[in-house]
Amino acid sequence: MIHKADEQGITKRRFFIVVNTKAGRYDDYLIYEYLTDLLSREDISAEIYSFINQQELSERIKKAKQEHFDLYVAVGGDGMIALLASYLQDCKKTIGIIPAGTSNTMANILGIPLDVKLAIQLLVHFEQTKTIDAIQIKDRLFFMNVSTGFSSSVVNELDSTKKSLLGIFAYIFTGLLHLPKTTQKSFSVTIDGKRQQVKAAELFVANSGVLGRPQYTVSDSMIDDGILEIGIVRETSIRGIVDVILDILVRKRKKSFQLIGQGKHITVLTEKPLIVQADGDIIGETPMTIGIVPKAATFAIPAQQKRGFATRDNAIST
């Protein structure tokens, strides 16, 4: 734990920093040493908590809420950010991000530098924040997308080493290898009370259409518009997967992704349980019930952020 007070004993700003040391780009020396050095030179006290498991983190956050920390920081990937935000739903504290994951999509969406030193400096001196929506499944929040079918099977087969080395291309290569085992599934989807039956290789619910990096998208869904987009990918052929790859990497007008609805409350039923992924992590199986939480979390962001690809209105609050 790092503490600092002025000569009169007045406590300075307090940060609670959760570190996922198993994140794809985590470097103990680069992050911990630079972080401790910078905070020791600033008017900040901080507790650095190494993430062990969800239960222990939940209990520690409950206590931290009563200790009046000014900023909560996630050091890790998108899953760590979503988990921390889930535990802070009831207190609306600002969250900072030090991107140390594989894809760091949230950092990309919010304009946070992927350079660790720049990201840490931002947290110390940030002047602006951005409040965004979240996907809710049971008591957990997620910020980007939930899917079942082809992509969740691919995620289930990936390990952290492949993701760290290849990034989004790890998903593409694994997807091509997985293609021969891919078949269409029957989905019963209810969107705001209206039910429909679809057959597809993939069903996804998007809060943000961004995938991995700003230029890679699956839909026009925006992270602060108060609504979720529901889409499918029907094709299971080589040509269909090539279209998916081209849609993600280069096409603005999508050919493989078909929007089947927009809504705030979605349920998905399948004939047999299918693996479900959310923000790149496996979270369970179908059936699933998904909702949206408007203005669910607030993040520290850089000043003078340009109008973004992932938000409806990038007017910033301070």
Image (tube, grey):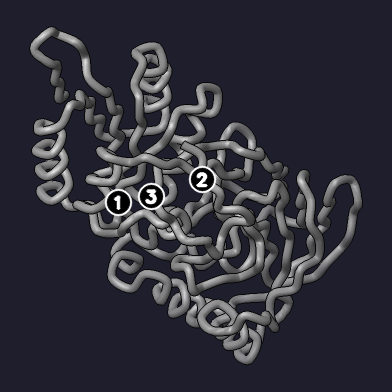
Query: If you read the primary sequence from the N terminus, does the residue marked by circle 3 or circle 1 appear first?
Result: 1
In three-dimensional space, the C-alpha distance between marks 3 and 1, rounded to whole angstroms, equals 27 Å
In three-dimensional space, the C-alpha distance between marks 2 and 1, rounded to whole angstroms, equals 29 Å
Q: Do the residues labelled 2 and 1 touch (CB within 8 Å)?
A: no
Q: Which residue is drawn at 36% across and 54% down?
A: 112
Eye-nearest disc, 3 or 1: 3
Q: Residue at x 41, y 17 (%)?
A: 65
Residue located beneath label 3 in the image: 303
Which image quadrant is residue 270 in? bottom right
Which residue appears farthest toward the top when viewing the image? 8
Residue located beneath label 1 in the image: 23
Residue 53: percent from the left, percent from the top? Answer: 36, 33
Q: Nearer the viewer, residue 81 or 273?
A: 81
What SS does tag 2 mark?
loop
Report crowding for label 3: few under 14, some 14 to 19, many 20 or more residues within 10 A (C-alpha). Answer: some
Q: Which residue is drawn at 69% across and 72% down?
A: 201
Residue 3: percent from the left, percent from the top? Answer: 15, 21
Which residue appears farthest toward the bottom when viewing the image? 239
Eye-nearest disc, 2 or 1: 2
Q: Are marks 3 and 2 in contact (CB under 8 Å)?
A: no
Residue located beneath label 2 in the image: 316
Q: Do the residues labelled 3 and 1 touch (CB within 8 Å)?
A: no
